[in-house]
Amino acid sequence: MPGIYVLVEHDRGEISPATFEALTAARNLAQRLTEEVVAVFIGVFDSDFNAVCTEYGISEGVVLASPLITDYGPELWGEALSQLSQERTPRIVMSVGTDKGNEVIAHASARLGSPFIANCIEVHRDSDWTITRMQWGGSLLEDVRVDTEQIFLSYAHHSVEPETAALSSDANIQIVELELDSLLTRTLVQERAAQAEGATLSTASVVVSGGRGVGSADAFAPLEELADLLAGKVGCSRAVTNNGWRSHADQVGQTGTRIAPEIYIACGISGAIQHWVGAMASKNILAINIDPEANMVTKAGYAVLGDLHEVVPAIIEEIKRRR
Amino acid sequence: MRILVCVKRVPAPGSRINITDDALTVDTAHLGFTTSPHEECAVEEAAQLVEEHGGSVCVLTVGPAEAEEQLRYAASVGANEFVLVPNESGHDWDPQRTSHVISEAITQLEAGGERFDLILFGNESADSGGYQVGIRVAVTLGRAVVNGIKGIEIQDTTVTASREVDGGNEVYSVPLPAVLGVKEGINLPRYPTMKGRLASKKAEISSTSIDSSAGPQEKVRLHQPEEKISETEILGNGPDAAVKVVDLLDELGVL
Ligand SMILES: Cc1cc2nc3c(=O)[nH]c(=O)nc-3n(C[C@H](O)[C@H](O)[C@H](O)COP(=O)(O)OP(=O)(O)OC[C@H]3O[C@@H](n4cnc5c(N)ncnc54)[C@H](O)[C@@H]3O)c2cc1C
């Protein structure tokens, strides 16, 4: 019976695309370990669950239901998953390493006193588990060994390319009613506030960022103009947020936002490793810097050497001239 | 109210993270150290809550004797009580061991005084990034816990905590005592004042040793991720480069 149990992340029935990474990773792992994959959906059954299992080649799904699970709640979800893990003793209980994925798996493993290995990129089993995982938001890797039978883990977000593998017949979905302690409803989501529509830093196709070299909050005006001209967003380094020049919502990096634009224009940013991990998924990088030795310059595909206060306005002029 | 903040001392590397010859730790010979950023914000948040509601802030760290530096920094920005749980092994403990030690330390601190109304952790530590210590401690203590928090408000016996998700915010309303994992961006940490710096020199730091043994997770080695090495094409020097830059933008179809 063991198997690989994968948490399906969803928001009131709407399945998060990040889950497709976990389903793909689990399927590949199952093939190597000759195990079966079981998808786990917590909450009120939604037919999307069935459709996703079928599309991703997962023939078996479990819905963990309880009248108490009316929405997301880390404690309820964690307890539900830990009950299932204890009863069916899967070899692996896993998710994708999003905030919620990591949170639920951490809760479930904590309740059973089992290890949880977050943000894995490779998982092997010989006599023990040997796993490679990310530290420092991916700037450094760690190999770990774990000598338990059952293991809880998450796959680093964006480390697996989702691949469908449609089943010829519908997945078999089983609904399991759980008895849960009503105390755990204390951490159910109570309310939501919607954000303005439109591109965000993480989805923008152009990001124009400024670092300490910009010098002040006001001096971001040309960067804003350039971003506007290119229908992009303005980003910044942590030196800028620490100085209070821009809000943290604009920060690119390990403790800020991870971006993946068509082009990242980094002005007056040295390219410290914690900034770089947030920017490295950009398809193209243009560094504008006075220092030819700056990490941002040596790692970027393109660079302009010079004072950003002269270069950025010149680019704006040239764009206007051509329009 | 009494607030506890659990912080971690981490190295502050620049353009690259070097590792020691035995591949078990970050080579910190030429590095400074700092408080892991999420936790730095957690200390600031605690200081602000106490300024608004009264009470005190206790800061706890598990680490080498040098982690005193991070506790003194917390003192310089408004914390009042400081606990160092020594780990002199030269290596981080695994997350289960760290959680066990912190849970025990909290139980001892509460036995000797008031219960903590709120315990704050960073969402994840900047270096090892295990995403679990705060949750394990809360589960051990039987307290409510939510991670990823970017907004905190206290009303009498509950804390309203919000976090960012795709497309908006989720709001939680959790009864105290509670545990929260905080993320950078919840506030802008203050810089220490001269007065704060002086006070931090006098701060009394208590050391509490706690017995513990290794969990089932063993670190084998650290290594560098594979890096794509790209040649940098210099488009030019100064404003004259603008023509080539705009050519590039055109080529990429973003003009
Ligand atoms: C645990 C941890 C997490 C972190 N997380 C993040 C994170 O998420 N994001 C992040 O950004 N940082 C992060 N940092 C901070 C990071 O280490 C750097 O300190 C920060 O990124 C530096 O910002 P900067 O490049 O703007 O400043 P600096 O490093 O000071 O670089 C300024 C650059 O501007 C150039 N310059 C100056 N004047 C001009 C000019 N007129 N024209 C052109 N170029 C000019 C200089 O040559 C230099 O390269 C983190 C640090 C730690 C320890």
Image (cartoon, helix red, strand yellow):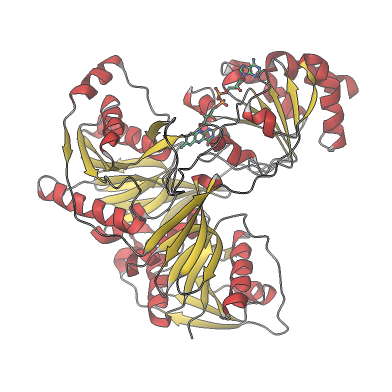
Q: Position of residue A225 (x, y in %)?
A: 72, 23
Give the answer, above or below, for where B88 lies relative to A309.
below
Q: Position of residue A134 (x, y in %)?
A: 52, 52
Give the answer, above or below, for where B190 lies relative to A123.
above
Q: Is residue A286 visible?
A: yes
State ligand 1's quadrant.
top right
Residue drawn at (30%, 57%) of the image:
B97
Residue nearest the observer in this picture, B220 or B70: B220
Image position of A43 (left or right of B132): right
Residue drawn at (51%, 39%) of the image:
B17
Q: Position of residue B32 (x, y in %)?
A: 41, 29
Quadrant hosting residue A186 = bottom left
Q: Residue furthest right?
A: A322
Q: Residue furthest front?
A: B21
Image position of A214 (left or right of A137): right
Give the answer, above or below, for where A289 lies relative to A41.
above
Residue drawn at (67%, 83%) of the image:
A170
Q: Position of residue B217 (x, y in %)?
A: 39, 62
